[in-house]
Amino acid sequence: MTLYDALVGPFAEFAFMRRALVGSLALSLGAAPIGVFLMLRRMSLTGDAMAHAILPGAAVGFLVAGLSLPAMTLGGLVAGVSVALLTGLVARTTVLKEDAALASFYLLSLALGVTLVSLKGSNVDLLHVLFGSVLALDDQAMLLLAGVASVTLVALALIYRPLVLECVDPGFLRSVSRAGGPVHFIFLSLVVLNLVAGFQALGTLLAVGVMMLPAAAARFWSNALTPMFAVAILVASLASVAGLLVSYHLDLPTGPAIILSAGVLYLVSVAVGWSGGVLWRLAPPRHHRAA
């Protein structure tokens, strides 16, 4: 097998591979920066919880209209935003903290979603919702992924300053501005939006992987925010390309192959990343020359 056959041939020969590549890259462009902000705000598990939270909405959309992209997307959006609002309401009106409230609602949502799909769907339908079908992206799914990536980047640019301030010092932001609440809600909406778009390609359970693993890997290559965004997008894109090629050549399921590729890049970053990686921490400290 030549290098062309290994790396370029699958995309040049098959349209479904090109569609999967474009869809995965669009998802990487929007989800990776969201993952960086989730990590910096110590909300890494929130993405996982919200991925489960959209399941009952997608399931209701599936029961009403089958594997219809608009119905499942709308249902997922409604369910995700509802869980975010209910979590905030419980955290602010009861003694329960936000993480415990979110964990309660996402577990309830996951159980409800799986039950709804199992009632009238087959095991194949359930696997489609949970793990997606990146090799079967149609025009509607491509437009959704591209649209969500565009909206995410524009929205992050508009709320960038208050969002960074909230990551660094939320108390200071509250003392000088009332933007903290709206910015937090807009950010959570972007998380839900990317997860809803992601489940079309990778399913509800794996969509969060392309959001958090590249962000965690980027942390080992830079302490500055802008390079961290660039590295996260690069890692997500490389994982998408590698996962598609590995899936094609080894006949493996595509969604898990993409996430496993991201996982390998994360482990490499943990080992050799020059901003806190294991190798650099074990290296002997440099001695400064006396002036």
Image (tube, rainbow, N blue to C red):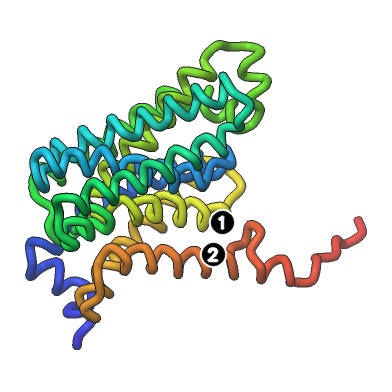
Between circles 2 and 1, the one closer to the viewer is 2
Residue 260 lies in what quarter of the image? bottom left
Q: Residue at x 85, y 65 (%)?
A: 287
CB-based contact (under 8 Å), mark 2 and mark 1: yes
| Residue topped by disc 1 | 221
Q: Residue at x 20, y 39 (%)?
A: 60
Relative to residue 207, is residue 197 depicted above or below?
Answer: above
Furthest toward the bottom, the residue is: 1
Where residue 33 sits in the image (x, y, percent)? Answer: 43, 42
Relative to residue 169, is residue 17 depicted above or below?
Answer: below
Q: Residue at x 52, y 27 (%)?
A: 163
| Residue topped by disc 2 | 269
Where residue 252 sits in the image (x, y, percent)? Answer: 25, 75
Q: Secondary structure at mark 1?
A: loop
Image quarter in which the C terminus is found: bottom right
- Amino acid type at mark 2: Ser
Image disc number at residue 120: none
Mark 2 nearby-residue class (10 Å; few <14, some 14–19, many ≥20): many
- Amino acid type at mark 1: Trp
Q: Secondary structure at mark 2?
A: helix
Mark 1 nearby-residue class (10 Å; few <14, some 14–19, many ≥20): many
